[in-house]
Image: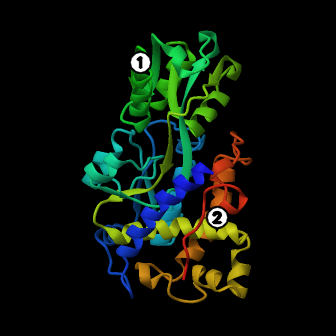
Amino acid sequence: MNWVRISCAVASLAFAATIMGTGAAEAAMGDTLKTIKERGHLLCPGHNGTYLGFAEVDNAGNWKGFDIELCRAMATAILGSPDKLKVVPISFAQRFPAIQSGDIDLIIKVTGWTLGRDTELGLQFSQPYFLGATQLAVNVATGAKTGKDLNGASLCSQAGTSTERLAADYLTNLKIKYEMVSFEKSEDMRAAFFSGRCDAVALWGPNLAISISQATDPNKFMALPDVLAVEPQSIAMRQGDDQFVDIANWMLTVLITAEEYGITSTNVDEHKAKAGNPTVARMLGATPGIGKRLGLSESWGYDVIKHVGNYKQIFDRTLGDGSPYKMKRGVNSLIRDGGVLYPLVID
């Protein structure tokens, strides 16, 4: 499977960066971790509006979504409680200046790991936590069947995203003329597309499917088969703070490992009590060591699962069967189930 090879190669790079920054004994507290502990809460980006399924606000004014849940998991790992999270609403264009200025501590905001971001923006990345293709969608009335049929079309996109650049590169390579119409807010972009202001829209595949499903008449719109790129979504952090990258990587591994072993927020106490498996014992803190090496409490893995759940639980309630979107796991299943997700080794 090509996507497996892509994800494995990218994750291997992240793993190499992780082990290079890890000491043989206890980790020294990095600048970011120290700042968060002294402040008493984690600053994580939300969205300046609604990014369906990943960062949105419910009717009670509470943040929800897949990326928000990962922010809650990071807050729990570091500070012991998901309530120690403060969500900062920002646009996609604002996320990179915001992390460099310290307005946020990390970026968990469907952010693709790209060469430019890795080498030019002063960022480093965790292992990928989600894989998705960037695609185009059209109003069925246009008659377009592929991207080649969009000559002279207007294309809605979101400013400051890799999706905007990927769409421009793709259509330019097709040697067709088009008009790019960029929007700061996701809602404005979707409204423009669904109202007919644009002939087509470029979006990251999972959000594209969700957006079409929520349209007043979904049958009027369809995704084209063109795949502009397959992007690994990763947690982005400031360059140089390797310990913080370690924490992000092992937080993701705890979520995935818990799913592998069937450990959930409801049965984690039972698993910790028996803890016969060495990996589980270390992950849940029954065998000490997982906290000391990262500068965290020995119970941080247990706390994350108890308060936030495992990867499957997070996916189900934000994107899957427990959400309005009913998205299938697909390529974002565990590798044993035909997907690309796998944990690092908790030794």
- Indicate how the structure is coloured in the image: rainbow
Residue 13 occupies which quadrant of the picture?
bottom left
The residues bearing labels 2 and 1 have C-alpha atoms spaced at a distance of 46 Å
Can you tell which of label 2 and label 1 is closer to the viewer? 1
Task: Of the two numbered discs 2 and 1 on the same chain, state the one appearing first in sequence.
Answer: 1
Left or right of 226? Residue 106 is left
Q: Secondary structure at mark 2?
A: loop
Left or right of 154? Residue 266 is right
Residue at image mark 2: 310
Image vertical order of residue 72 relative to residue 187, above or below: below
Residue at image mark 1: 175
| Residue 83 in the image, given as x and y percentages of width and height | 51, 62
Left or right of 314? Residue 50 is left
| Residue 114 in the image, given as x and y percentages of width and height | 38, 47
Q: Residues within 10 Å of mark 2 (few under 14, many from 20)?
A: many
Name the residue nearer the viewer: 64 or 338: 338
User: Type of residue at label 1?
Assistant: Lys
Image vertical order of residue 139 relative to residue 12, above or below: above
